[in-house]
């Protein structure tokens, strides 16, 4: 695939014929700007608690990882929902993930009064080193997101380079786990399970020659990823705390601690599969072929 072909697929007019912002792009823009705006308002109104820097580091970090996972999900969802236009917001989401990651770093550096020696020392520790590698890996992705760079690299090289986003997802999850506040593993485990699900999807899609995956296989992947998330959570407690990992695993099978993150991974995955089923029925009703085979971009 050439760079021009990739661009044709990912680009769509930002505005419609009447000059209005296209609804999908407007929704994506709202999604990426809102957390930053809320953080700014909370900051200006002194609503970030005793340690405002720490609150801002956590907030920007959480949104950076959420946007990385959402960006990873765009292509599978585009195929599953037979919604080609979805790809037109992938670039905005990816760039927003980079912007939140850079903000996260800047707030962290500000918290350390921009003292280079302190920052350099801390960054050599495992948790910050993993985050720093993730951020460095995102830079070539952001730098090659312009039209000129897509054309210059050519479609195949651009797509190969952009597979790095999976490594970024894994590193971001590891960094998140290593810095977990108050042993609250809920969101980190959901993000970890979703990264596993999206990577497994990608591997299966490539192994089946990109002919499109049956919905039952995606349902199976969602369930397996939920169990993988349970394993990751138990492994974390086993390795990093004195809490018995078996107790953590068995907590998944009672509702005493509410619905555990592994189940949420399944709920999210199966929710999208259900949306895919609904979409197929809708397409069949209109006499259109369901889920057209689309190449990865
Ligand atoms: C792609 C890059 C990165 C992502 C996605 C990311 C994401 C996150 C997340 C999700 C958290 C946990 C927030 C929480 O506990 O609720 C976090 C914490 C943190 N991150 Fe990052 N991070 C990245 C890079 C970096 C870099 C480069 C640094 C600094 C060199 C850094 C410094 C920190 C610090 C200091 C915390 C801990 C805050 C605390 O004490 O709770 N991160 N990060």
Image (spheres, rainbow, N blue to C red):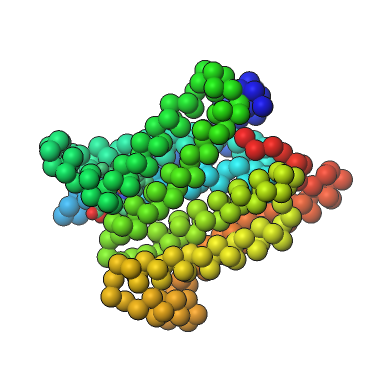
Q: Position of residue 269 (x, y in %)?
A: 59, 59
Residue 269 seen: yes
Q: Residue at x 55, y 51 (%)?
A: 199
Q: Position of residue 20 (x, y in %)?
A: 57, 27
Q: Is residue 164 left or right of residue 286?
A: left
Work out which quarter of the rendered image holds the N terminus and state it: top right
Q: How many numbered marks does the figure carry?
A: 0
Q: Residue at x 35, y 72 (%)?
A: 238
Picture quadrant of residue 187? bottom left
Q: Nearer the viewer, residue 158 or 266?
A: 158
Q: Is residue 285 left or right of residue 16?
A: right
Work out which quarter of the rendered image holds the C terminus and state it: top right
Q: Nearer the viewer, residue 19 or 206?
A: 206
The answer to whether 56 is drawn above or below residue 151 in the figure is: below
Q: Residue at x 53, y 39 (%)?
A: 163
The answer to whether 19 is drawn above or below residue 167 in the figure is: above
Residue 12 seen: no
Q: Is residue 175 left or right of residue 190?
A: left
Q: Position of residue 180 (x, y in %)?
A: 30, 59
Q: Position of residue 121 (x, y in %)?
A: 16, 44
Q: Is residue 229 left or right of residue 11?
A: left
Q: Residue at x 22, y 45 (%)?
A: 124
């Amino acid at each position: 695939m050439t760079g021009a072909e990739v661009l044709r697929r990912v680009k769509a007019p930002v505005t419609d014929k009447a000059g209005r912002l296209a609804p999908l792009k407007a929704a994506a823009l709202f999604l990426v700007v809102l957390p930053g705006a809320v953080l700014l308002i909370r900051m200006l109104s002194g609503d970030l608690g005793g340690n405002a820097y720490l609150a801002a580091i956590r907030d920007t970090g959480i949104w950076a990882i959420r946007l990385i996972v959402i960006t990873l999900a765009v292509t599978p969802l585009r195929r599953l929902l037979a919604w080609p236009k979805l790809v037109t917001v992938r670039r905005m989401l990816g760039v927003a993930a980079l912007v939140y990651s850079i903000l996260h770093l800047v707030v962290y550096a500000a918290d350390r009064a921009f003292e280079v020696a302190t920052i350099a020392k801390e960054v050599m520790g495992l948790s910050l080193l993993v985050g720093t590698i993730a951020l460095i890996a995102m830079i070539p992705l952001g730098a090659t997101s312009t039209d000129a760079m897509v054309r210059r690299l050519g479609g195949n090289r651009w797509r190969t380079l952009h597979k790095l986003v999976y490594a970024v997802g894994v590193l971001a999850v590891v960094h998140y786990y290593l810095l977990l506040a108050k042993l609250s593993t809920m969101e980190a485990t959901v993000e970890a399970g979703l990264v596993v699900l999206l990577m497994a999807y990608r591997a299966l899609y490539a192994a089946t020659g990109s002919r499109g995956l049956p919905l039952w296989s995606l349902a199976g992947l969602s369930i397996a990823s939920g169990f993988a998330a349970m394993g990751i959570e138990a492994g974390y407690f086993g390795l990093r705390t004195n809490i018995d990992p078996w107790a953590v695993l068995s907590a998944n099978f009672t509702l005493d601690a509410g619905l555990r993150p592994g189940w949420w991974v399944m709920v999210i995955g199966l929710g999208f599969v259900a949306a895919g089923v609904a979409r197929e029925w809708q397409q069949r009703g209109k006499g259109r072929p369901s889920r057209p085979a689309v190449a990865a971009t």
